[in-house]
Amino acid sequence: MGLERVQPGCSLVHQILVGDPGFDLLDGAAITKLAKQCVEEQPKKRPNMKEVVARLEGLRAVQEHGEEINVHP
């Protein structure tokens, strides 16, 4: 499946994570959207690393479990 075919709100995160108590489905959609933006053909449309880090830190899993994985948003 090419990334151009991924529908908004869709997640490319592996289904095994769905049952994980630390995983939030909204995070999966956010990660998928971020991944699509990172591989955008036009470099100017890609987020810079500061934006990528900020968006990853904003994930619910990081907000709720960041201490457990030594991430401090």
Image: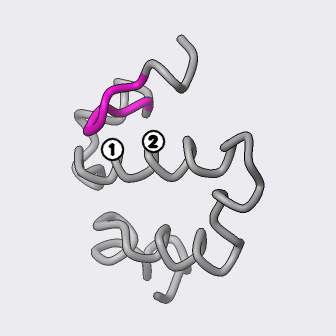
In the image, residue 9 lies in the stretch drawn in magenta: yes
Q: Residue at x 35, y 24 (%)?
A: 15
Q: On residue 20, which mark appears? A: none
Callout 2 crowding tier (Cα within 10 Å): few <14, some 14–19, many ≥20: many
Residue 29 — which label? Answer: 1
- Residue 42 in picture, x, y percent from top left: 74, 48
C-alpha distance separating marks 2 and 1? 5 Å
- Residue 8 lies within the magenta run: yes
Pick the front one: 13 or 50 = 50
Q: Nearer the viewer, residue 60 or 29?
A: 29
Most common secondary structure along the magenta stretch: loop
Image marks 2 and 1: residues in contact by CB distance under 8 Å:
yes
Q: Residue furthest bottom?
A: 72
Amino acid type indicated by mark 2: Thr
When asked about the image quadrant of residue 32, the answer is top left
Task: Report the residue marked by disc 2.
Answer: 32
Q: Which residues are magenta?
A: 6-12
Residue extending farthest to the right is: 43
* Quadrant position of residue 9: top left
Q: Locate residue 59, reporting x and y percent.
A: 36, 67
Left or right: 61 with respect to 45?
left
Q: Above or below — where is 19 with respect to 37?
A: above
